[in-house]
Image (cartoon, helix red, strand yellow):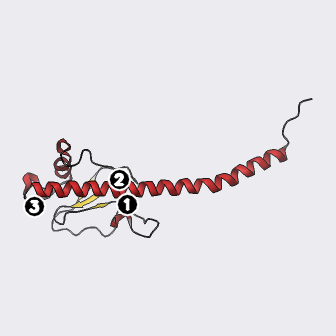
Amino acid sequence: MKRGFSIIELVIVVAVLGILAAIVVPQFQSHATQAKEAVAKDSLRILRSGIELYTTQHGGVPPGYEDDDPRTVPSSSTFHNQLVLEGRYVLKMPENPFNRLRTTLVIANAETFPEVPTGTYGWVYQPATITIRLDWPGTDKDGLRYYDY
């Protein structure tokens, strides 16, 4: 006669597995968020260094302006081309680790920087102020907005 597991034994095993999963899953989610935060900070460091280097090598004019003329309207395509050109400043435009986008919203000189991130771009950049930010709502574990990194 073959003997299998009873329903009660199976229910106990499933309950124990459920409890273990409830303990372990939040730990993994926390580590994933911490990793994204670290990548975001490092990507911003790389972008800011590239922008600073470009600005220094172009007579104080930051990337984003056509023909390095700050009187022109800045554009995201000009910014990307100038910063990534031949990998001289940034090898590859980093992606926002939260929404996985590499796109950049470029803010014109006379416009004010948006107060609130939308999450529809990877980055928000204003050449006039040489400011680049992560376009992602929310805060980290310390209560700091991702947008303010």
Q: Secondary structure at mark 1?
A: loop
The residue sitting at the right extreme is 1
Residue 66 placement, left or right of 83: left
Q: What is the crowding at mark 3: few (fewer than 14 residues within 10 Å), some, or many (at least 20)?
A: few
Q: Which residue is mark 3?
A: 60
Q: Which residue is mark 2?
A: 96
Marked residue nearer the N-terminal end (2 or 3): 3
Residue 26: quarter of image? bottom right
Picture residue at 34% right of the left edge, 64% below the top = 149
Question: Which label sits in the foreground, 2 or 3?
Answer: 3
Q: Which residue is mark 1?
A: 136
Mark 3 is on which residue type?
Gly
Mark 1 is on which residue type?
Trp
Q: Secondary structure at mark 3?
A: loop
- Residue 68 percent location from the top left of the image: 8, 55
Picture residue at 39% right of the left edge, 63% below the top = 137
Marked residue nearer the N-terminal end (1 or 2): 2
The quarter of the image holding the N terminus is top right
Q: Secondary structure at mark 2?
A: loop
- Residue 71 percent location from the top left of the image: 7, 61
Q: What is the crowding at mark 1: few (fewer than 14 residues within 10 Å), some, or many (at least 20)?
A: many
